[in-house]
Image: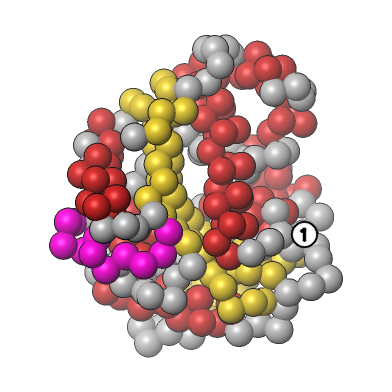
Amino acid sequence: MVLSRPFTRLPSFGVALLFGVSATAGAQTIPASNDQARDRLNDSPRHGEWVSISTDSGPVESWIVYPERADSAPVVIVIHEIFGLTDWIRAVADEAAAAGFIAVAPDLLSGKGPDGGRTDSVDRDGAVALVRGLETAEVHARLGSVAAWATALPAARSEYGVVGFCWGGRTSFTLATADPALGAAVVYYGTSPDSDALARVEAPVLGLYGEDDARVNATVPDAKAQMDEMGKVFEIHTFDGAGHGFLRAQEDREGRNLTASMQAWPRTIRFFREHLGS
């Protein structure tokens, strides 16, 4: 396992100064934290909009953000946490578009809420309950339909990758076991698939984990060993002192979550550019 350690344990302002930028400027190079997400979306210069994407299990309401570029772009699908499609996930999509990708964040609770609603039809606890009730096969099918729709856009290339967080991180990894067309998968603090499923992985996988996340991290070493044995790409980084959900909760853990975020997000973008193109 590769262990990525921050240079020192500093509060958020110290971490920002360590990277040679102000706290505000530093935050603009990575996705917003949960508390910053709404303001970041309101201030974004990029074009984002809601779209309805047809799937075999009904339309999936999705947030799409377009990069500011003249040529065609690879697609990145952003898979939400167990909390459903929140402003924070939309802000992550916006940051992926800032890096040059067409970013699509599907609400996988579309049609699952009261009266056929999506995430915003329930409270946080309701969203968690609905996500826990989703069937993996349906989720994979919906993501496949979203990918097909997005890569067929006039501004898009055929290459696509996925990045997911927590529940979405596991879903990102399991999609790699199910879709041979997937170009790259990035897993933020999501558990690894079962051993038998790993043999079906074709896409390169990047795993990003907080050190203080025992439940998730317990699933990583065996998966890494098996992927290595089979000659498959599973690049992993575990960030010292960071907790579960570090990219969303950047203000927590006396700067260690922010340090992890400032290291993890650039790795994410480099990984997508390496395997999907820039």
User: Which portion, as a residue range, is magenta?
Assistant: 194-204
Residue, x 67% and y 76% (percent of image)?
A: 156
- Reading the image, the residue beneath label 1 is 46
The image shows residue 106, relative to residue 209, as above or below, that is below
Give the image location of residue 97, x and y in percent: 68, 58
Tell me: 249 left or right of 75.
left
Give the image location of residue 74, x and y in percent: 63, 69
The image shows residue 89, relative to residue 143, as above or below, that is above
Image-quadrant location for residue 135? bottom left
Observer-nearest residue: 118 or 192? Answer: 192
Magenta stretch prevailing secondary structure: loop
Tell me: 263 left or right of 169.
right
Give the image location of residue 43, x and y in percent: 78, 48
Residue, x 36% and y 27% (percent of image)?
A: 211
Q: How many marks?
A: 1
Residue, x 44% and y 76% (percent of image)?
A: 181
Give the image location of residue 110, x and y in percent: 43, 71
Q: In which quadrant is the C terminus drawn? A: bottom right
Residue, x 80% and y 62% (percent of image)?
A: 68
Q: Is residue 135 magenta?
A: no
Image-quadrant location for residue 142? bottom left
The image shows residue 41, relative to residue 5, as above or below, that is below
Residue 68 seen from this side: yes
Hey, what amino acid is under mark 1? Arg
Residue 49 seen from this side: no
